[in-house]
Image: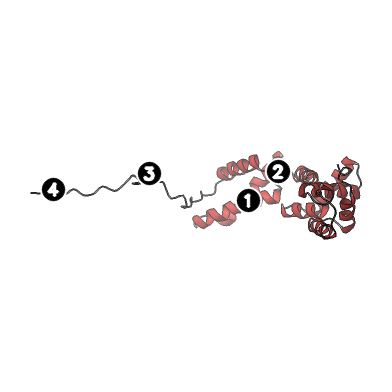
Amino acid sequence: MQGPKHKAEPNTVNSKSGAAPTRDRTAKKIPKKITDTYLHNSGLYYLQRFSASTAHFKSVMMRKVKRSCMAHPDQDFDACRAMVDALTERFEASGLLNDTVYARGMADSLRRRGRSRKAIIAKMTERGLRKDQIEAALESLREESGVAESEAELAAALKFARRKRIGPFRAGEKDPALLRKDLAALARAGFSYDTARKALDFDGEDAF
Protein backbone atom coordinates (compact mmCIF):
# COMPACT_ATOMS: atom_id res chain seq x y z
CA MET A 1 0.00 0.00 0.00
CA GLN A 2 1.34 3.32 -1.08
CA GLY A 3 1.76 6.15 1.35
CA PRO A 4 0.04 9.54 0.95
CA LYS A 5 1.24 11.64 -1.95
CA HIS A 6 2.83 14.93 -1.14
CA LYS A 7 2.50 18.08 -3.26
CA ALA A 8 5.77 18.84 -5.02
CA GLU A 9 7.58 21.85 -3.66
CA PRO A 10 8.71 24.50 -6.17
CA ASN A 11 12.31 24.03 -7.25
CA THR A 12 14.27 26.85 -5.66
CA VAL A 13 17.69 25.51 -6.62
CA ASN A 14 19.27 25.32 -10.06
CA SER A 15 19.55 21.58 -10.74
CA LYS A 16 22.77 21.99 -12.71
CA SER A 17 24.71 24.49 -10.66
CA GLY A 18 23.06 24.05 -7.29
CA ALA A 19 22.63 27.81 -7.06
CA ALA A 20 19.44 29.66 -6.24
CA PRO A 21 17.74 31.22 -9.27
CA THR A 22 18.63 34.84 -9.94
CA ARG A 23 16.18 37.68 -10.47
CA ASP A 24 15.37 38.70 -14.02
CA ARG A 25 17.92 41.39 -14.75
CA THR A 26 15.96 42.57 -17.78
CA ALA A 27 13.12 43.80 -15.56
CA LYS A 28 13.05 47.60 -15.67
CA LYS A 29 13.07 49.60 -12.48
CA ILE A 30 10.03 51.82 -12.10
CA PRO A 31 11.08 55.51 -12.04
CA LYS A 32 10.50 57.40 -8.82
CA LYS A 33 7.94 60.16 -8.55
CA ILE A 34 9.29 63.66 -9.04
CA THR A 35 9.82 65.74 -5.91
CA ASP A 36 12.10 68.67 -5.11
CA THR A 37 14.20 66.43 -2.87
CA TYR A 38 14.52 63.69 -5.47
CA LEU A 39 15.55 66.13 -8.21
CA HIS A 40 18.03 67.89 -5.91
CA ASN A 41 19.74 64.67 -4.85
CA SER A 42 19.68 63.28 -8.38
CA GLY A 43 21.13 66.51 -9.77
CA LEU A 44 23.92 66.60 -7.18
CA TYR A 45 24.79 62.97 -7.89
CA TYR A 46 24.99 63.66 -11.61
CA LEU A 47 27.26 66.70 -11.19
CA GLN A 48 29.54 64.73 -8.87
CA ARG A 49 30.20 62.33 -11.74
CA PHE A 50 30.02 64.61 -14.76
CA SER A 51 30.66 68.25 -15.59
CA ALA A 52 27.82 69.78 -17.58
CA SER A 53 26.56 72.94 -19.18
CA THR A 54 23.33 74.41 -17.86
CA ALA A 55 21.42 73.33 -20.98
CA HIS A 56 22.80 69.80 -20.88
CA PHE A 57 22.03 69.46 -17.16
CA LYS A 58 18.44 70.55 -17.75
CA SER A 59 18.06 68.05 -20.58
CA VAL A 60 19.30 65.24 -18.31
CA MET A 61 16.86 66.23 -15.56
CA MET A 62 14.00 66.57 -18.05
CA ARG A 63 14.62 63.05 -19.32
CA LYS A 64 14.10 61.86 -15.75
CA VAL A 65 10.90 63.88 -15.56
CA LYS A 66 9.55 62.44 -18.80
CA ARG A 67 10.28 58.85 -17.75
CA SER A 68 8.69 59.47 -14.35
CA CYS A 69 5.57 61.07 -15.83
CA MET A 70 5.19 58.16 -18.24
CA ALA A 71 5.26 55.76 -15.28
CA HIS A 72 3.08 57.97 -13.07
CA PRO A 73 0.38 59.63 -15.21
CA ASP A 74 -1.06 61.38 -12.16
CA GLN A 75 1.93 63.75 -12.09
CA ASP A 76 1.65 67.26 -13.54
CA PHE A 77 4.34 67.50 -16.23
CA ASP A 78 4.41 71.32 -16.23
CA ALA A 79 4.81 71.37 -12.45
CA CYS A 80 7.71 68.91 -12.71
CA ARG A 81 9.35 71.03 -15.41
CA ALA A 82 9.03 74.09 -13.17
CA MET A 83 10.86 72.16 -10.44
CA VAL A 84 13.71 71.44 -12.88
CA ASP A 85 13.90 75.13 -13.81
CA ALA A 86 14.01 76.14 -10.14
CA LEU A 87 16.69 73.56 -9.36
CA THR A 88 18.81 74.75 -12.28
CA GLU A 89 18.57 78.34 -11.05
CA ARG A 90 19.63 77.30 -7.55
CA PHE A 91 22.60 75.36 -8.89
CA GLU A 92 23.62 78.33 -11.05
CA ALA A 93 23.39 80.67 -8.06
CA SER A 94 25.54 78.34 -5.95
CA GLY A 95 28.15 77.91 -8.70
CA LEU A 96 27.50 74.22 -9.24
CA LEU A 97 26.54 75.15 -12.79
CA ASN A 98 28.80 77.70 -14.46
CA ASP A 99 28.78 77.76 -18.25
CA THR A 100 31.78 80.11 -18.49
CA VAL A 101 34.02 77.80 -16.46
CA TYR A 102 32.61 74.70 -18.13
CA ALA A 103 33.14 76.07 -21.65
CA ARG A 104 36.70 77.19 -20.89
CA GLY A 105 37.64 73.82 -19.40
CA MET A 106 36.06 71.89 -22.24
CA ALA A 107 37.82 73.97 -24.91
CA ASP A 108 41.17 73.46 -23.20
CA SER A 109 40.63 69.71 -22.82
CA LEU A 110 39.64 69.23 -26.46
CA ARG A 111 42.59 71.31 -27.69
CA ARG A 112 45.03 69.24 -25.63
CA ARG A 113 43.57 66.09 -27.20
CA GLY A 114 44.31 67.37 -30.70
CA ARG A 115 40.84 68.48 -31.77
CA SER A 116 40.44 71.07 -34.53
CA ARG A 117 38.61 74.34 -33.95
CA LYS A 118 35.76 73.05 -36.11
CA ALA A 119 35.51 69.83 -34.09
CA ILE A 120 35.67 71.74 -30.81
CA ILE A 121 32.80 74.03 -31.83
CA ALA A 122 30.71 71.03 -32.92
CA LYS A 123 31.33 69.16 -29.66
CA MET A 124 30.62 72.17 -27.47
CA THR A 125 27.44 72.94 -29.38
CA GLU A 126 26.37 69.35 -28.86
CA ARG A 127 26.83 69.89 -25.12
CA GLY A 128 24.33 72.74 -25.09
CA LEU A 129 26.68 75.74 -25.17
CA ARG A 130 25.75 78.83 -27.16
CA LYS A 131 27.88 80.24 -29.97
CA ASP A 132 28.90 83.30 -27.94
CA GLN A 133 29.97 81.11 -25.00
CA ILE A 134 32.04 78.90 -27.29
CA GLU A 135 33.74 81.84 -29.01
CA ALA A 136 34.51 83.47 -25.65
CA ALA A 137 36.08 80.23 -24.36
CA LEU A 138 38.22 79.80 -27.48
CA GLU A 139 39.35 83.43 -27.35
CA SER A 140 40.23 83.09 -23.66
CA LEU A 141 42.24 79.98 -24.49
CA ARG A 142 44.07 81.76 -27.30
CA GLU A 143 44.91 84.77 -25.14
CA GLU A 144 46.21 82.60 -22.31
CA SER A 145 48.39 80.49 -24.60
CA GLY A 146 49.70 83.49 -26.53
CA VAL A 147 49.67 81.33 -29.66
CA ALA A 148 48.09 82.40 -32.94
CA GLU A 149 45.05 80.39 -34.06
CA SER A 150 46.90 78.99 -37.09
CA GLU A 151 49.72 77.71 -34.87
CA ALA A 152 47.27 76.22 -32.41
CA GLU A 153 45.51 74.39 -35.27
CA LEU A 154 48.83 73.03 -36.57
CA ALA A 155 49.81 71.82 -33.11
CA ALA A 156 46.42 70.11 -32.75
CA ALA A 157 46.78 68.50 -36.19
CA LEU A 158 50.17 67.10 -35.20
CA LYS A 159 48.72 65.69 -31.99
CA PHE A 160 45.93 64.10 -34.00
CA ALA A 161 48.44 62.64 -36.47
CA ARG A 162 50.60 61.26 -33.66
CA ARG A 163 47.61 59.63 -31.96
CA LYS A 164 46.49 58.06 -35.24
CA ARG A 165 50.08 57.20 -36.27
CA ILE A 166 49.72 58.84 -39.65
CA GLY A 167 51.88 61.23 -41.68
CA PRO A 168 55.23 61.93 -40.00
CA PHE A 169 54.41 59.39 -37.28
CA ARG A 170 53.92 56.46 -39.62
CA ALA A 171 56.87 54.13 -39.98
CA GLY A 172 58.21 53.42 -43.47
CA GLU A 173 58.60 55.39 -46.66
CA LYS A 174 56.09 57.99 -47.78
CA ASP A 175 53.52 56.77 -50.27
CA PRO A 176 51.26 59.05 -52.40
CA ALA A 177 48.26 56.80 -51.69
CA LEU A 178 48.87 57.02 -47.95
CA LEU A 179 49.29 60.79 -48.21
CA ARG A 180 45.83 61.12 -49.75
CA LYS A 181 44.43 58.84 -47.05
CA ASP A 182 46.06 60.93 -44.31
CA LEU A 183 44.79 64.18 -45.82
CA ALA A 184 41.28 62.73 -45.83
CA ALA A 185 41.59 61.70 -42.18
CA LEU A 186 42.66 65.20 -41.15
CA ALA A 187 39.88 66.76 -43.25
CA ARG A 188 37.28 64.57 -41.52
CA ALA A 189 38.70 65.73 -38.19
CA GLY A 190 37.94 69.33 -39.20
CA PHE A 191 41.39 70.58 -40.23
CA SER A 192 41.82 72.76 -43.30
CA TYR A 193 43.79 71.52 -46.31
CA ASP A 194 46.68 73.93 -45.62
CA THR A 195 46.93 72.86 -41.97
CA ALA A 196 46.77 69.20 -42.92
CA ARG A 197 49.53 69.55 -45.52
CA LYS A 198 51.78 71.40 -43.08
CA ALA A 199 51.26 68.70 -40.45
CA LEU A 200 52.00 65.89 -42.91
CA ASP A 201 55.12 67.67 -44.23
CA PHE A 202 56.73 67.63 -40.78
CA ASP A 203 59.55 65.23 -40.14
CA GLY A 204 58.77 62.73 -37.41
CA GLU A 205 61.68 63.95 -35.26
CA ASP A 206 60.58 67.58 -35.52
CA ALA A 207 56.88 67.01 -34.85
CA PHE A 208 57.13 67.07 -31.03
Mark 2 to mark 4 CA distance (whole Å): 72 Å
Badge 2 marks a residue whose secondary structure is loop
Asked if the residue under mark 4 is in contact with the one under mark 2, i.e. CB atoms within 8 Å, the reply is no
Disc 3 target residue: 17
Question: Where is residue 63 drawn, in percent x and y?
Answer: 60, 54
Whether pointer 1 and pointer 4 mark residues with C-beta atoms closer than 8 Å, the reply is no
Mark positioned earlier in the residue sequence (2 or 4): 4
The residue at 88%/41% (across/down) is 145
The kind of residue on which mark 2 rests is Leu
Q: Residues within 10 Å of mark 1 (few under 14, many from 20)?
A: some
Residue type, label 3: Ser
- What residue did someone put label 4 on? 4
Decide which of 158, 148 is in the foreground and name it.
158
Q: Residue at x 63, y 51 (%)?
A: 60
Residue linked to disc 1: 60
Q: Which residue is mark 2?
A: 97
Horizontal and vertical percent position of residue 120: 79, 51
